[in-house]
Amino acid sequence: SILAASITVKDELFYGFLRPWLGQSLLLSNGEDWSRRRRLLTPAFHFDILKNYVKIFNHSSNIMHSKWRRLVAEGESRQDMFNHISLMTLDSLLRCTFSYNSNCQESSSEYIAAIFELSTLVIERRGRILHHWDCLYWRSPEGQRFKQACSVVHGFTRTVVQERRAQLLHRGEPESHTDTTGGEEKKKKKRVADFIDLLLLSKDEDGHGLTDEEIKAEADTFMFGGHDTTASGISWVLYNLSQHQDHQDRCRAEVNDLLQDRKTEDLDWSAPVRPSVRPSVRPSVRPSVCLSVRLSTRDMTVPGGRVIPQGSICLVSIYGTHHNPEIWPDPDVYNPMRFDPENSKDRSSHAFIPFSSGPRNCIGQKFAMAELRVVVALTLRRFRLTPGGVEVRRLPQLVLRAEGGLWLTLETLDNTLTQ
Ligand code: HEM
């Protein structure tokens, strides 16, 4: 009820460190300002839009898998999943948000390095009490690094937004580009509208759109909110499947069955990857985001009759909710059957909240789940995953990570069609 209540707002102590990076975006705004933004942004996450991105998810997975094949052939079959998958989710997001091909999975990119730097610095700042004061932080070496990384990220986003606005004014629609399909023949093909196009075109009831500064804040927020979370989800799915070979085999058989009569391995939105893959993915997004924080703006009575006084900071443990033994017996056991309709029918809808709940739930959840399914399905088709021989210790940060990385051993499977 704390997440659902309209009398709680985002707490500045918890979220404030993100503000110099993300600005006044959907994630950090409150009240009427938040609801206007949410109305303007919601159409960009409609199924009709998202289904166009599935090609990008396939493409980014293909790049990652080619790299894995090469590494395995060179004898480096033990790999840190977080490392590879974070780059892959950033690659996808850059393409879906800005139509930008950073090539970041193959070579280093200043922009991507700045995003990693900012994510690390935000966590570090939280843990150092003296750095909570702006006057001390901005003078510290970490504060200077934060400023530097922000200027790289903001510079990039600002340039794309301004250039795209100018194109839109001249051409009135997303720019076209030349694509080669069908041998030598070159066909003019329209570029898929990305998030920047959609935000530039969105208008509220009074016909007002978002300013360049507002679009920049939202795009930076998608990059922040969409990469680590999805990478954590995918990494933990693969980890869980590496621990349960029987289930991994069942999921792989299902994916192979699905692709049996196809000429390519590209999965589309409608790929009926079920009944095994879907429930395998669900338990693994349980821990992605560990915590949500709210500030009560009035006294609030919660079920059970207790009163949360005005001004209280409320920590809602998403991780704790998903590991509450009263709701989830044997909470640490990976059991996809928990999500069987028969086994879920008596469970409250608030028992499973990886994307939070209520009006401020995750706007990107369908995007994330589609990417998760594509990446997991293609990975199982192409690789067998076994434990990496290093004990995996959970490390709760903004998202759940693993201390020292999440190492798995990859074995290339030779059943691949053309990509
Ligand atoms: C598995 C992947 C993901 C998980 C587990 C996740 C989880 C969450 C959670 C728990 C919240 C609520 C935060 C809070 O209450 O403080 C949230 C909000 C949000 N997420 Fe996600 N997220 C994921 C992927 C994405 C993606 C891919 C995007 C964008 C492309 C995105 C964009 C956002 C935004 C903009 C908000 C703020 C919504 C609002 O306040 O109205 N997320 N997410």
Image (tube, rainbow, N blue to C red):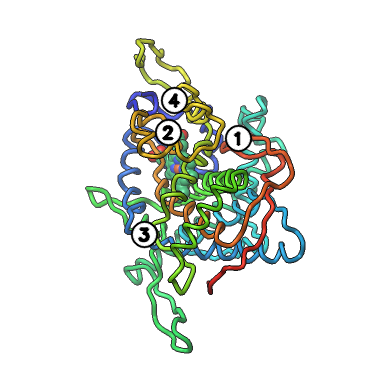
Tell me the CA gap for discs 4 and 1: 24 Å
- Determine the image quadrant of residue 391: top right
Looking at this view, is 175 or 239 the one in front?
Answer: 239
Residue position marked by numbered label 3 in the rendering = 270
Vertical comparison of 107 with 246: above or below:
below
Looking at this view, is 212 or 357 the one in front?
Answer: 357
Q: Position of residue 392 (x, y in %)?
A: 68, 39
Residue 397's disc number:
1
Tell me the CA gap for discs 1 and 2: 20 Å
Residue position marked by numbered label 4 in the rendering = 327
Residue at 39%, 28% in the rendered image:
3
Residue 49's disc number:
none
Helix, strand or loop under label 2: loop
- N-terminal-most mark, 4 or 3: 3
- N-terminal-most mark, 3 or 2: 3
Helix, strand or loop under label 4: loop
Figure quadrant, ligand 1: top left
- N-terminal-most mark, 2 or 4: 4
Please name which of the two marks, 4 or 1, marks the residue nearer to the observer: 4
Vertical comparison of 91 with 12: above or below:
below
Dot 2, crowdedness within 10 Å: few (<14), some or many (≥20)? many
Q: Position of residue 234 (x, y in %)?
A: 55, 48
Tell me the CA gap for discs 1 and 3: 34 Å
> Which residue sits furthest left?
205
Q: In the image, what residue type sits under mark 1? A: Gln
Tell me the CA gap for discs 4 and 3: 32 Å
Q: Where, quadrant-wise, is the N terminus in this rendering?
A: top left
- N-terminal-most mark, 1 or 2: 2
